[in-house]
Amino acid sequence: MSLSNWKSDKKLIERMSKAIRSGSVSHAYIIEGDSCVDKEAFALDFLKAICCEKAPGEGCSDEAEEEKCLNCRRIDHGNCEDLYIVRAEGTTTKSVKDDAVLKLQENLKKKPAGSRNMAVICNADTMTKRAQNRLLKTLEEPNPGTVIILLSENRENLLDTIKSRCIFYRLSGGENTDMESLKDANRLVDALIEGEKFFELKQLLAKSVKSREDAFRMLDGMERIYRNLLLEKDPRGRLLKKENVFRAVQLIEEARRDLIMNVNYNYVLKNLMLKIGG
Ligand SMILES: [Zn+2]
């Protein structure tokens, strides 16, 4: 794809394109979005827009493969030697570890084949403190032309010193958000507000959450609903004490962290129901 093919966040993407076209490319970005937004795909499109030879700020689209510029084609085919992707590792607890950042740094020291070295750190918000402190050195003194993109669902897990060195973009996902999962989340929140028995809540969960991905979507949906309750955009908010809604948002964020840490999704959601309901 190219940047303009993204259906959601049109205004934000326009701003990003404009910045690239005017030559202001930062050396570091945090791109944040819910788990249902394909942030990695977006980051690759963003990098295409940065290094595209035919349509700077936009990137070559998929329509005519043979007309794509070399840079875009390499990124699309996953064989761009100037691009290094870091992913969270681990069997029980997934995180981006210190030695992964060390390898990244070694790669960023190489002379790029094209005009710049690029890196994407997926699940950057799972980076260990040690890894973050190591990355900080690179963010403080990057080689000219380097672009590092940190993908995150919750930047609160990142050190302030890292956040302050990155341009921050938040993708809402907009139309990409699954409406069905929002409906499921709504039903669950209704049941919680009405003080339904744990047994009923468990039944609702069993119907709508059948995988870890579903669980992420459920949490994203619930968080959005509770935040709206907090902002009084939702009339149900009047039925609740503000501090309880605020606590629910915090509990949802905790539950998401547990999911990222690979805790069993059934356990995470049931535990959340007990905590919010209780
Ligand atoms: Zn291109």
Image (tube, grey):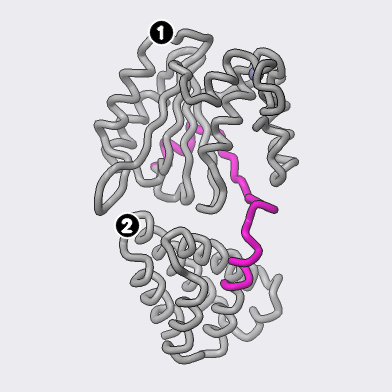
> At 34% from the left edge and 72% from the top edge, which residue is drawn?
267
Q: Considering the numbered disc 2 on the image, is that residue within a helix, a strand or a loop?
A: loop
Q: Going 52% across and 72% down the picture, which residue do you hit?
A: 208
- Image location of residue 272, percent across then percent down: 41, 74
Name the kind of residue labelled 1 in the image.
Lys
Q: Which residues are magenta?
A: 159-185
Image quarter in which the N terminus is found: top right
Image coordinates of residue 221 in percent, x first then y, are 57, 65
**Dot 1: within a 10 Å radius of its alpha carbon, few (fewer than 14), some, or many (20 or more) residues?**
few
State how far apart marks 2 and 1 are (Cα). Answer: 37 Å
Disc 2 target residue = 262
Q: Is residue 216 above or below residue 31?
A: below
Tell me which residue sits at (36%, 75%) in the image.
Answer: 271
Which of the 4 quarters of the picture holds residue 60? Answer: top right
Above or below, comparing residue 51 to residue 258 in the picture: above
Secondary structure beneath dot 1 equals loop
Q: Quadrant of ligand 1?
A: top right
Q: Position of residue 116 (x, y in %)?
A: 50, 14
**Amino acid marked by disc 2:** Asn
The mark found on residue 183 in the picture is none
Q: Is mark 2 within 8 Å of ligand 1?
A: no
Q: Which residue is mark 1?
A: 111
Q: Quadrant of the C terminus?
A: bottom left
203 sits to left or right of 64: left
Q: Residue at x 35, y 30 (%)?
A: 135
Above/below status of 23 relative to 276:
above
Please state the horizontal and vertical placement of residue 100, each as a whole percent of the image. Answer: 29, 32
Q: Residues within 10 Å of mark 2 (few under 14, many from 20)?
A: some
